[in-house]
Amino acid sequence: MIPRYARPEMVAIWSAETRFRIWFEIEAHAADAMAALGTIPREAAERIWTASDAEFDVARIDEIEAVTKHDVIAFLTHVAEIVGPEARYLHQGLTSSDVLDTCLAVQLSRAADILLDDLDRLMAALKRRAFEHKDTVCIGRSHGIHAEPTTFGLKLAQAYAEAERNRARLAAARADIATCAISGAVGTFANVDPRVEAHVAEKMGLTPEPVSTQVIPRDRHAMFFATLGVIASSVERLATEIRHLQRTEVLEVEEYFSPGQKGSSAMPHKRNPVLTENLTGLARVVRGMVTPALENVALWHERDISHSSVERMIGPDATVTLDFALNRLVGVVDRLVVYPETMARNMDRLRGLVHSQRVLLALTRKGVSREDAYAIVQRNAMKVWERGADFRAELQADPDVAAALSAEDLAAEFDLGYHLKHVDTIFARVFGQ
């Protein structure tokens, strides 16, 4: 993670200070549970908690680790320097993975809470703009080519529904990742009572892992990061739509261009979709972290640490990057400039061709076979493509059309409102209103 694409609240979750504070809380809560069970003296557990007032010296821990080559041992050694002789009761029956995996569960849960809030704000922005443009008519495109009319509000409603699905996915992934393992070597609880795990889980806002193998199973983490990848893809989908709609030849929407902003070092006229281009790139980064998470699932026997280096990187990077991207997208949606007049002009560029399906269906209702109706409509449509003719005028002049449809019948098939009659129904499905 780099400061350019990072927000302080999410970054703080992954700081060394936060990590060591979580490690300490895990160890201290475990000591409390052991004291309650009579495994260690009560006064030892109380003495351990006195270290909670201390500021853990990251530089000192790094100094110890340079010798021990083991981060958890370095941390415990530093805590012992603060606590004194009672520190010998720390880490009774625990393994490093008990601390590391439980800490990671806490960090990912906290990160998920921030991301859930990000999605809530994105959904609020999308909903507001969707209702603002519920009836703003624009052309729908398939294969990048004009298809039939829709509204810009429906485009935003679709993005809202996608974000809502992503929120549900993330909430489920958060619940799945929030497990605690304090089960000792190879996960058998041989040297630590399962009640210690239950106590630590409750205090840290987690649930006990039903069966761990010294490490928490990595299918949980794989699902979490896969969910982040799906959310990133949804960010990119909306960003790509905005980028296409901002192209000079289209210009139906535009990112807000602030006073003093510059679009190009060479061309003073440029107003580029830099924010949504940036979002496309950030989405690629987040998705790139999904495959390593999936590959972490297959560990050797009860544990190895091939997953560790991966998670030390993708944990912070994926959550920090996605948090930044979601917040940037909220800003883009909130301040997006929409041009209804341009949408209307673009709608008319093909001189009525967007109504071709309606004419096709009208002919079939008048007894023309579908194959013949298609051929009749298509041959007139090609005149529009090739010569810039007016579609309705060409149809009126076609004797096969005139034999089936009166001028009044044909005019009715060019009613733009026909395409919008179910917009309220779709909005009710999406927003429940």
Image (cartoon, rainbow, N blue to C red):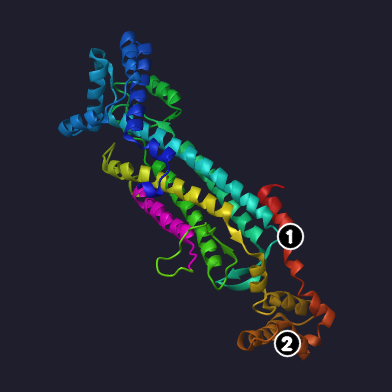
Q: Which span of residues is magenta-colored?
A: 270-294
Tell me if mark 2 has few (under 14), some (14-19) or many (20+) residues whose alpha carbon lies within 10 angstroms of its own: some
Q: Quadrant of residue 323?
A: top left
Q: Position of residue 46 (x, y in %)?
A: 34, 12
Tell me if mark 1 has few (under 14), some (14-19) or many (20+) residues whose alpha carbon lies within 10 angstroms of its own: few
Q: Number of marks in the image?
A: 2
Q: Does 289 appear in magenta? A: yes
Q: Which mark is residue 402?
A: none
Q: Residue at x 76, y 80 (%)?
A: 363
Q: Secondary structure at mark 2?
A: helix
Q: Position of residue 72 (x, y in %)?
A: 26, 29
Image height check: is 367 above or below 252? below
Residue that carries the numbered disc 1 in the rendered image: 422
Image height check: is 382 above or below 214? below
In the picture provided, is 154 more to the left or to the right than 248?
A: right
Front in this rendered view, residue 243 or 227: 243
Q: Secondary structure at mark 1?
A: loop
Q: Quadrant of residue 352?
A: bottom right
Identify the amino acid type marked 1: His
Identify the amino acid type marked 2: Glu
Q: Position of residue 163 (x, y in %)?
A: 56, 50
Mark 1 or mark 2, whichever is nearer to me: 2
Q: Is residue 295 visible?
A: yes
Q: Residue at x 78, y 91 (%)?
A: 399
Q: Is residue 39 visible?
A: no
Q: Quadrant of residue 14?
A: top left
SS assignment for the magenta stretch, majority: helix
Image height check: is 349 above or below 32? below
Q: Does 111 appear in magenta? A: no
Q: Which mark is residue 394?
A: 2
Q: Residue at x 54, y 66 (%)?
A: 246
